[in-house]
Image (tube, rainbow, N blue to C red):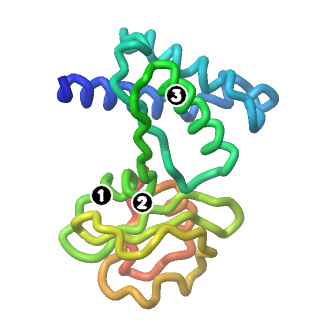
């Protein structure tokens, strides 16, 4: 049963990622204001329909524990908690930066997943080749002098990484599209 649950979770996650970029087009900026749960609930309903599952078939709900927009996290966690409470299933918090780091496989160096935090900031953490967190999550201002203390290859992944590709130009930086 857990293999089936894992498969369904992956399928739902993939459908969510496909839709993530279309949210603004589908709901428009005016109806997707902070605090508006309606688009989230509508998307969950549509994803379940497309995946041919009902909410009652879920065995757990996973939600990002951050980092990210405070309002976005609050809305997502609130919706997830509501579903979990109503369905009497567990809520699983997932480290978003760890998920990003796991998109890259390395033999040496470090992985720094980056989530754009606007302006010249990014939410970051640092992981070794075994995905063990070796530097805690932080919101940091990124400039050409960032990460000078790290020797060896630095593998950057996430929307924040791509944002700083023209800033972090040393040969030790390796960029991976999200």
Write down the quadrant of residue 57 in the picture: top left
> Mark 2 or mark 1, which has the lower sequence index?
1
Write down the quadrant of residue 8 in the picture: top left
Dot label at residue 157 = 2
The answer for how far apart the CA atoms under marks 3 and 2 are is: 20 Å
Provide the residue designation for mark 1.
Answer: 104
Give the left or right position of residue 161, taking residue 11 as reference: right
Residue nearest the viewer, comparing 23 with 59: 59
The answer to whether residue 72 is above or below residue 154 is: above
Q: Mark 3 near mark 2, Cβ–Cβ under 8 Å? A: no
- x, y (%) of residue 137? 49, 68
Q: For numbered disc 1, what is the local secondary structure?
A: loop
The answer to whether residue 61 is above or below residue 117 is: above
Residue 165 in view of the camera: no
Badge 1, how many Cα within 10 Å: few under 14, some, many 20+? Answer: some
Badge 2, how many Cα within 10 Å: few under 14, some, many 20+? Answer: many
Residue 8 in view of the camera: yes
Residue nearest the viewer, comparing 145 with 4: 4
């Amino acid at each position: 049963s857990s293999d089936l649950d894992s498969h369904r979770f992956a399928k739902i996650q993939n459908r969510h990622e496909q839709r993530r970029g279309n949210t603004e087009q589908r709901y428009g900026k005016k109806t997707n204001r902070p605090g508006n749960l309606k688009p989230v609930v509508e998307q969950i309903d549509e994803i379940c329909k497309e995946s041919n599952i009902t909410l009652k078939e879920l065995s757990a709900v996973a939600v990002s524990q951050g980092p990210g927009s405070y309002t976005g996290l609050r809305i997502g966690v609130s919706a997830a908690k509501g579903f979990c409470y109503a369905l009497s299933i567990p809520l699983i918090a997932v480290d978003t930066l760890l998920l990003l780091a796991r998109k890259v496989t390395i033999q040496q160096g470090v992985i720094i997943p980056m989530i754009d935090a606007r302006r010249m900031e990014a939410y970051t953490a640092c992981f070794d080749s075994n995905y063990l967190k070796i530097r805690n999550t932080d919101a940091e201002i990124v400039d050409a002098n960032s990460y000078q203390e790290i020797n060896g290859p630095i593998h950057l992944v996430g929307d924040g990484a791509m944002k700083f590709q023209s800033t972090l130009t040393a040969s030790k930086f390796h960029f991976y599209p999200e």
